[in-house]
Image (spheres, coloured by chain):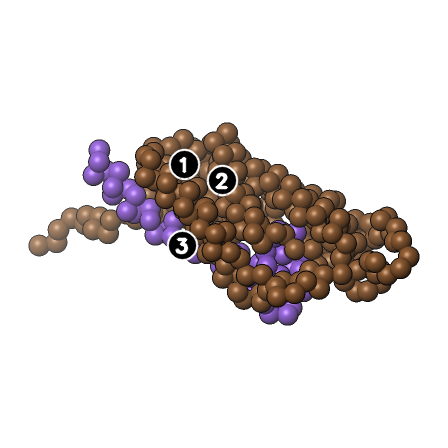
Chain colours: A brown, B purple
C-alpha cells in the first residue's frame, strides 16, 4: 500500500521566494550608496545654509535690526558636530533605502509587463521619483529653512502624502499609460493638489533673510535631483544584476 | 504565454506589496513621525529632503 514517496509539497513558487530577497538586496545596495552620496552632498551644500538660518532662528543674528549684517558669518565646518552629522548620514541612507524598496518593487512590476529595467532606464525612474516625492510637493510646500512660518505640521503632512501619491500615479500613467486619457488624468493629478492649495501659515513670522530661504530651497532641490537620479540608476543596475543572478541555474 | 505571465505576476504581487509597505514604513518613521527623539535626530535631513518638519 505504501506509495512511493512523491513530492507532494509544491516547491515554493519560483517567483515568490526569491522575489522579496531580490527586491531587498537591490534596495539595500542602491539606497545605501545613493543615500550616502545624498548625505555628503547635503552636508556640503545644504547644511551650511541651514546652520546659517539657525543663527537667525535662534536670534543670534537679527535681520533688519539696524546694522547691516554680514552675509558670511563664521559657520562650523563639515563634520564639526560629528554626532549630529552622523545622524544625518544614517537617516538619509534610511530614507533613500525606503524609497529604493518602493521603486524597485514597482520596477519589478514594470519588468513583469515587458519593460526593460537597467541602469540606463533607471535614470528615468529616478527623475520620475524626484518629481513625485520632491518637486511635486515642493512646488507648493517649498523646502523649509528652519525658522519659517508654516501651517500646522499634521495638515502639511496630509497634503504632502496626498500630493506625492497623486504625482506618483501620474508618473506611472505618463510612463506606461500609452493613451490620451491616461495623459489627461496624469495632468489632472499633477495639477489638482496645487489648485486646491497647500496649507499655508496665517501670518509670516520668519526671521530668516529671504536670500537664505531661496538658496536653501534651490540647494535642497538640486541635491534631491542628483540623489534621485543616482538612486534610480543604482536601483535599475542592482535589480538587473540580481535578476541575472537568479536566472543562472545553481 | 498569457496564463504564465498572469501566474507569475500573481505570485509576485505579495513580495511587491510587502516591499512597498516596508518602504513606506521606513519613510514615515524617519521622515514624518513627530516623536521628539526622532524629530531631533532626523531634523536636518527632514529639512534638507523637503519634508514638513515642525
Please state which of residues A108 and A161 is positioned toward the viewer in this rendering.
Answer: A161
Q: CA distance from mark 2 to mark 3?
A: 22 Å
Could you say where residue A26 lies in the image, as x and y percent from the top left?
49, 42
Could you say where residue A247 lies in the image, as x and y percent from the top left?
38, 34
Q: Chain of mark 3?
A: B
**Residue holding disc 3:** B18
**Residue holding disc 1:** A175
Name the element at disc 1.
helix
- Residue A30 — which label? none
Look at 52% across and 47% down and name the residue there.
Answer: A136
Labels 2 and 1: the sequence-earlier one? 2
Q: Say whether residue B6 is left or right of residue A149.
A: left
Q: Chain of mark 1?
A: A
Could you say where residue B50 lies in the image, as x and y percent from the top left?
61, 52
Looking at the image, can residue B48 be seen?
Answer: yes
Q: CA distance from mark 1 to mark 3?
A: 23 Å
- Residue A128 — which label? 2
Q: Mark 1 and mark 3, same subunit?
A: no
Could you say where residue A36 lies in the image, as x and y percent from the top left?
64, 45
Q: Chain of mark 2?
A: A
Q: CA distance from mark 2 to mark 1?
A: 9 Å
Look at 34% across and 40% down and name the residue there.
Answer: A182
Look at 61% across and 51% down and name the residue there.
Answer: A142
Q: Hey, which quadrant is residue B35 in on the image? A: bottom right
Q: Say whether residue A91 is left or right of residue A47.
A: left
Q: Residue furthest right?
A: A67
Name the element at disc 3.
helix
Please state which of residues A162 and A36 is positioned toward the viewer in this rendering.
Answer: A162
Q: Residues within 10 Å of mark 2 (few under 14, many from 20)?
A: many
Amino acid at each position: 500500500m505504501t506509495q512511493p514517496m512523491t513530492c507532494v509539497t509544491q516547491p515554493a513558487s519560483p517567483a515568490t521566494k526569491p522575489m522579496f530577497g531580490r527586491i531587498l538586496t537591490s534596495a539595500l545596495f542602491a539606497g545605501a550608496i545613493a543615500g550616502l552620496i545624498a548625505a555628503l552632498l547635503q552636508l556640503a551644500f545644504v547644511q551650511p545654509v541651514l546652520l546659517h538660518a539657525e543663527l537667525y532662528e535662534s536670534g543670534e543674528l537679527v535681520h533688519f535690526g539696524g546694522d547691516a549684517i554680514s552675509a558670511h558669518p563664521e559657520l562650523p565646518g563639515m563634520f564639526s558636530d560629528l554626532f549630529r552629522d552622523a545622524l544625518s548620514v544614517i537617516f538619509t541612507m534610511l530614507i533613500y533605502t525606503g524609497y529604493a524598496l518602493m521603486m524597485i518593487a514597482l520596477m519589478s512590476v514594470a519588468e513583469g509587463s515587458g519593460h526593460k529595467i537597467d541602469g540606463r532606464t533607471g535614470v528615468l525612474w529616478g527623475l520620475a521619483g524626484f518629481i513625485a516625492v520632491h518637486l511635486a510637493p515642493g512646488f507648493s510646500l517649498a523646502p523649509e529653512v528652519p525658522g519659517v512660518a508654516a501651517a500646522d505640521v499634521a495638515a502639511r503632512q496630509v497634503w504632502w502624502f496626498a500630493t506625492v501619491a497623486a504625482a506618483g500615479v501620474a508618473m506611472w500613467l505618463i510612463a506606461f499609460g500609452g493613451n490620451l486619457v491616461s495623459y489627461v488624468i496624469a495632468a489632472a493629478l499633477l495639477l489638482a493638489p496645487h489648485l486646491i492649495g497647500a496649507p499655508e501659515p496665517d501670518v509670516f513670522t520668519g526671521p530668516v533673510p529671504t536670500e537664505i530661504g531661496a538658496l536653501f530651497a534651490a540647494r535642497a532641490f538640486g541635491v534631491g535631483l542628483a540623489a534621485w537620479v543616482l538612486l534610480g540608476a543604482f536601483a535599475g543596475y542592482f535589480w538587473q544584476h540580481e535578476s541575472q543572478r537568479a536566472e543562472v541555474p545553481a | 504565454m498569457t496564463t504564465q505571465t498572469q501566474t507569475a505576476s500573481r505570485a509576485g504581487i505579495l513580495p511587491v506589496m510587502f516591499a512597498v509597505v516596508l518602504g513606506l514604513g521606513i519613510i514615515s518613521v524617519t521622515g514624518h513621525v513627530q516623536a521628539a527623539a526622532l524629530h531631533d535626530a532626523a531634523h536636518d535631513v527632514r529639512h534638507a529632503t523637503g519634508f514638513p518638519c515642525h
